[in-house]
Amino acid sequence: MSAGIHHHGKLMQAATYAAMACGAVLVTIKASAYFDTGSVALLSSLADSALDFLASFVTFLAVRFSLTPADKEHSFGHGKAEPLSALAQTAFIAGSAVLVGVEAISRLRNPAPIQEEVTGIIVMVIAIVLTLALVTFQKFVVRNTGSVAIGGDSLHYTGDLLMNVAVIVALVLSSQWGLTWADPVFGVGISLYLMINAGRIAYLAVGGLMDRELPDAERQEIRAVALQYPKVKRIHELRTRSSGLQKFVQMHIVLDPALTLLEAHRISEDVAKAIEAIMPGVDTIIHQDPDGIEEYHPRVGELL
């Protein structure tokens, strides 16, 4: 494991520890506030925080497993554990959205006054501060690692920030203005927002499992690095993907047919090292093609 990947792995692990600690604190204080207030909006936030904690625990396990070095049975590593955990997060979030929606609709039919709203507001302000700190750290980790699992975790905690603000508004409208319908209406809105978040996380996770190509900017950078060598006439069959922190690059480079096998090998090694310089730890496979020789390259899936 390269030094860069090792450092990124440490960052990802720190993010999972922070998320679980934050989740545990939020569940504790929100549970206490819900029993004091009876707010369905606060209940929705409590349910989401409880599932957030479970999702963060799954992320912790997935990140730990994804960083396990490749072995005999998994020669490409264990990076797919990350998008798998993101799909698990989707299930958690969708489940909480359904539960919150059902409770909110029930409360719409039978409105109930809010009790001890000041306690609820204080707790939600504390939740906002803690969640904002966590999301800021998670986004820093995602920028540095590109982790899908941490990105999914960060996405629903970001949703929590908006949810916490919504809960405060619902508490104020219900207790101070007598709008008892505001609390369950906000609950329904939060439920819908959770479903949208679940869809976004699922999209990212499925992309990782289906080996989506690296972003166009990174692919263009790879091309530019390879073509900076004068003896590389062209490149083609560029294929890229990622699995957790590990990125994979395959390409064919077109060389002068008069080059010796040793020279062609050295050029390929130089190109691979240059790619690794911009993508530390990348796994690169380069095939050399002699210029002027036609080759048949079946598209992926043609052999099935």
Image: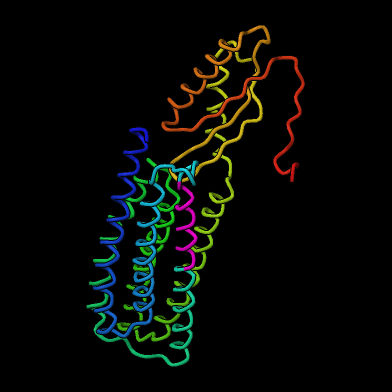
The foreground one among 236 and 114 is: 236
Colour pattern of the rendering: rainbow
Quadrant in the rendering for residue 144: top left
Residue ID at (41%, 62%): 159
Image position of 4 with respect to 132: above or below: above
Image position of 109 with respect to 118: above or below: below
Point out residue 6 in the picture as x, y percentages from the top left corner: 33, 38
Question: In the displayed image of the protein, which residue is found farthest to the bottom?
Answer: 110
Q: Nearer the viewer, residue 12 or 143?
A: 12
Residue range of the region highlighted in magenta in the rendering = 78-91
Q: Quadrant of the N terminus?
A: top left
In percent of the image, x 39 and y 61: which residue is there? 58
> Which one is nearer the viewer's eye here, 112 or 240?
240
Relative to 134, does residue 39 appear above or below in the rendering?
below
Q: How many marks?
A: 0
Q: Residue at x 24, y 79 (%)?
A: 32
Q: Is residue 236 left or right of residue 87?
A: right
Label the magenta part by its dominant secondary structure: helix
Residue at image coords 39%, 86%: 180
* Residue 84 is one of the magenta-drawn residues: yes
Q: Is residue 44 magenta?
A: no
Q: Position of residue 156 (x, y in %)?
A: 41, 61
**Percent x, y for residue 133?**
27, 55
Residue 247: x percent and y percent?
Answer: 49, 37
Left or right: where 284 falls relative to 144 = right
**Furthest-top residue in this view:** 258
